[in-house]
Image (cartoon, grey):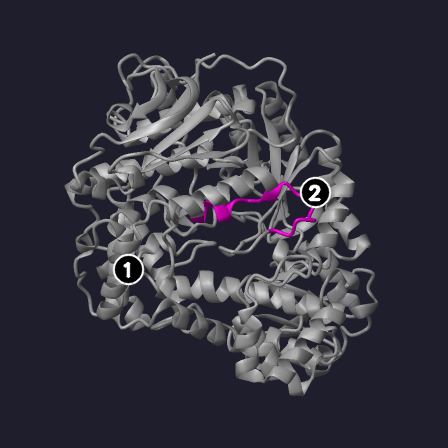
Amino acid sequence: MSQQPSRIPPEPDVPPPSAPASTYRLQLRPEFPFDAAAAAVPYLASLGVSHLHLSPVLEAVPGSAHGYDVTDHSRVRAELGGEAGLRALAATARAHGLGLVLDIVPNHMAVPTPLRLNRPLWEVLRDGPDSPFARWFDIDWEAGGGQVLLPVLPGPAGECDLRVDGDVLRHGEQEFPLRKDTAGLELPELLAAQWYRPAWWREARTSLNYRRFFTIAELIGVRVEDPEVFAATHAKVLELVRDGVVEGLRIDHVDGLADPGRYLRRLREAVGPRCWVVVEKILARRERLPSGWPVAGTTGYDALHRVDGVFVDPAGTAELARQYRDFTGTPPWEQEAEACARQVLTGDLAAELAALERMAGPDLGAAVRELLVAYPVYRPYPEAPEPDPGAVERAAAAAGAGAVSAVRELLLHDRAFAARFAQTSAALRAKSLEDRAFYRYAPLLSATEVGGEPGEPAVSVEEFHAYCAALARDWPGSGTVLSTHDTKRSADVRARIAVLSQAPRAMGRPAGPDPQLAWVARQTALGLGDAPEAPARLEEALLKAVREAGLHTSWTEREEAYEATVPDYARTGGELPPELAGAVRANLLGTALLHLAMPGVPEVYQGAETEYRALVDPDNRRPARFPREDLARLDAGAAPDGPAQEKLALTAAVLRLRRARPALFAGYAPLTARGPAAEHCLAFARSPGLVAVATRLAHRLDGAGGWRGTVLPLPPGRWVPLPVREGSYGGPYAGKAPLEELLSAWPVALLVRQE
């Protein structure tokens, strides 16, 4: 978009905001430690970001590629460079005008190998409920007969080689602490005398008696609602905040906590008023964040859904859904989602369901199940408006009004039951929707994203404007994202797939004995296109998809013969028809502009400042490629060469403007085009001095004959496209801008009012 994206005059006397101007997410790992991040700082500063957002930095399982499996809250991870490395990174960032934001994990810790890496858990297993660390974990000692189930063995305990070695019990590389004075017992008596029971991993589904993260038994829940546990697990992070090393915090999986509101109030008191805090909270489409939470907002999946959705054609999506159901026999979305919820609740989460039913009593078990299945959001919050009053009525119709009423009374008056119900509800939504139904229901794969609604993926222009206006009014410092370490497909892959909603016939009838997998493979290949190593990456993603879907194979019950056919599907064609190239470009640049210019704090995922095609993890957590040379050429005056460099130029231009003149990005006002193609223009004003314009549904626009005299009325003043490139956009404009002229070279434009 620019030959000179860095030439932005600074705005004088603007106080430093407590919220970042923008963030850039870096995935740290042993292969990309703190010093590698520090080496990237000069480039990231030149790109225009204001803060680096680091994946978890506390001590984790050795070799962890993500850091969410924390083993020690008191130390910065040695494999990344330790605390000295983190402080050096902060100093380098500060010298270039950047701050740090940390991703922290309050909900869970690792159940590592060896177990002694998690000292609090090790001591609980050795000393039982009398251990001072017993308060750290949600363990139902009674349900386990006085023992913690440890589902870590490859088979039944009687078939495994368990042996005593000094003061530990061993199985291969695994070791377990022995209770005092039990080392001399015979093995059966020794096992019965411990505070834990080593068990086959399959027993976790039905017999686990500690709270875990979703269905991952290797991650044990932490009781941060306890003030002493909070203090112990947050001491190092709070020290880093107090010392100015860290200026913001991302709170991972806030729905997993027993009392998120109380936790956030305690955290805010500890970090002070200026620390930027956002929560990973997946909001349903009509759900609102509790207004009393002392946070800046969410990490931004709610924005992702709106930005993606406004580039989806509802008519074409309906046609794709019809084709998909005819081709695969898959039921409608609502039926699929409910079926998956029931399967996950009674299967993968059977242990969690049993715990809730014990707490509620045998007569209320059915009502507990029906309320969990019917609940329309991740978890209930008493301080938030009821998102769907009909959910209770649906549950009552299935389980009986009296029983459902009794469970609701428990939710209102029994704090322990309410917390466990909410935590189970969050796990159920995540596992049944994100990790199952989204892999089964795939008419338009770009819609099967965290926080999305595959049954209703299109977002109208009016809904987009209403969302942005509310964000600017209520949560102006909230995060916004398009690609993350958790997205199933990066924004640019989704942008390519979304074009199919404008041209359903381009989907064709993919070949293969499994129609559902053939359809998924075809759309995934179209999204990935000619990306490097595409066939191998596609095969890995498809194998994960079929295991998550659980239709013919799964992670725990693998069907080798079926999985052997998956590579054949990975060889499907991956290029969209040439006539859709313009629509792909419009989607790629349009989603980027809306994300960067809309209310909130935009986050650029590592490498996504240029065209970034990635699939589900681990593909999206590969080492980043920073386009230093491309940015340097653009800054030297070279014209962008292709959509990837166009996106880089656009991203740098808007990020630099946000950092230099933050006051431009205040407020929000929709702008409405006039003329025969008005529906294809999405435009809005930020403050009195900035206007963003994007083309939507560009393939349909071309088919209808283009803009045909459509104009965009502008706020008062003279407006020039930014960055200024003589002859590229015309202008300056006053009163209105002819879209055929304004968008002649690019499908997007950013206008700044001349003083």
- Mark linked to residue 170: none
Residue 157 spot, x, y in % from top left: 59, 78
The spot of residue 288 in percent (x, y) is: 58, 52
Position in image of residue 589 (x %, y %): 34, 34
Q: Is residue 518 magenta?
A: no
| Residue corresponding to mark 2 | 75
Residue under numbered circle 1: 318
- Between 542 and 682, the residue placed more toward the observer is 682
Residue type indicated by callout 1: Ala
Mark 2 closeness class: few <14, some 14–19, many ≥20 residues within 10 Å: some
Q: Is residue 611 above or below residue 10?
A: below
User: Is 143 left or right of 748, judged from the image as shown?
Assistant: right
Quadrant into which the N terminus falls:
top left
Magenta range: 289-305
Kindly state the secondary structure of the residue where label 2 is placed.
strand
Quadrant of residue 362 within the rendered picture: bottom right
